[in-house]
Image (tube, helix red, strand yellow):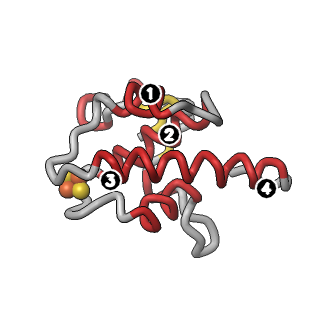
Amino acid sequence: MLVDDNPTHACVTPVGAVAGRRVRTIEALEEGGRLHPVQQAFLDAGAFQCGYCTPGMILTALGLLLRCPDPSEEAIVRAMQGNLCRCGTYPRIVQAIGRAAAELRATAVAGGAR
Ligand code: FES
């Protein structure tokens, strides 16, 4: 989940620790039936197989892109290091985050940042 736009492990965070803070989960990203650009990029890049890791990957990626809209591949890999994918889709995850970054930058230029 994102807590005040920072990736946070929900499984080890007591609910009292996030009282009064902005909490976003994967379910909060879609708007009006449209996937968030990070979700869409993961889908377009085929960046998941079983999907078990995908919510954490997407939210960690979004947290990165909120801090750093144009990350290098090295920065993407570094930011995602705490997230494990048993299916081994890492190359596609990195590709998806690059695509999402480009889409979010283009959307921000057009005035529609999410
Ligand atoms: Fe299966 Fe990542 S897609 S664990």
Q: Provide the residue designation for mark 3.
A: 54
Q: Provide the residue designation for mark 2.
A: 23
- Number of other residues with Cα within 10 Å of mark 1, as a class: few under 14, some 14 to 19, many 20 or more: few
Q: CA distance from mark 1 to mark 2?
A: 27 Å
The residue type indicated by label 4 comes to Gly
Tell me if 14 is positioned left or right of 5 in this view.
left
Circle 3 or circle 1, nearest the eye: 1
Tell me if 82 is positioned left or right of 66 in this view.
left
Residue 52 visible to an observer of this rendering? no
Q: Is residue 86 above or below residue 83?
A: below
Q: What is the x, y in percent for residue 35? A: 55, 66
Q: What is the x, y in percent for residue 94? A: 41, 44
56 or 69: nearer the eye?
69
Circle 2 or circle 4, nearest the eye: 4
Q: Provide the residue designation for mark 4.
A: 112
Circle 3 or circle 2, nearest the eye: 3
Residue at the spot x=43%, y=38% of the render? 60
Residue 77 falls in which quadrant of the image? top left
